[in-house]
Amino acid sequence: MHKLRPTLWRTCRVLANEKRLQLLYALFEKGEQCVFELAGEVSISEAHASIHLRALNSRGLIRQRRSKMRVLYSTEANIEVASAKPLLEALHICHSQNIPTRFLLKQATAFTHPRRIEIIQNIPPSGIAKDLLKEKTCISFSALSRHLGKLTTRGFVRGGKNIYFKKMPPDALSKALMQLVAKTE
């Protein structure tokens, strides 16, 4: 079996899907379940549930095991995937705090592009001018503006007078994402 090495931005793309988050929530609530049960929980076909579960499994966020003729899924982080455990724990906390799925989807989309991770990594605690950030990241002004806009509307960056600062949103998922971005190479 090949070793999983998912990138954070691709993992965020997997998480930025309402049905996948609903599947995770169903597993948080009821524990280990098969595709048929999960499909019923989130009102999708078994084929679609299977596709979504494969995506979550490929990111190390769930575990599957065979029991006779059924495949059972549970929320268990793959230890080979560094981002899996903190993300799964954060999502579990958000679920227990009833944080709306729409909000979590929005937060996950903040890091669905590798450039946004690079931007956050290049903003020092003291802040940075947009010109210098452009120079450090080699991202065009128009693309940099779009990415900064997305990071700003999701609460990860604040800007004023052309200086940008990192900002920590209060929810568990956003905190986990920021910590993982700091560790990403």
Image: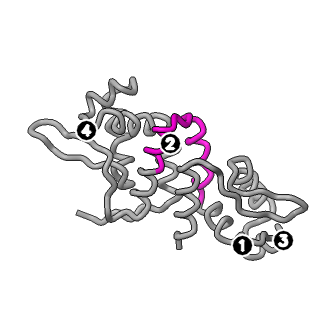
Residue 5 % position (x, y): 39, 65
Say which quarter of the image contains residue 167.
bottom right
Label 2 vs label 1, nearer the camera: 2
The answer to whether the residues at label 4 and label 1 have Cβ atoms under 8 Å apart is: no
Label 3 vs label 2, nearer the camera: 2
- What residue did someone put label 3 on? 131
- Mark 4 / mark 1, whichever is N-terminal: 4
Residue 32, disc: 4
- Mark 1 / mark 3, whichever is N-terminal: 1
Q: Amino acid at mark 4?
A: Glu
Quadrant location of the N terminus in the rendered image: bottom left
Query: Residue 101 in magenta?
Result: yes
Give the residues drawn in magenta, as a range: 90-113
Query: Residue 59 in magenta?
Result: no
Would residue 38 appear left or right of 119 to someone viewing this image? left
The answer to whether the residues at label 4 and label 3 have Cβ atoms under 8 Å apart is: no
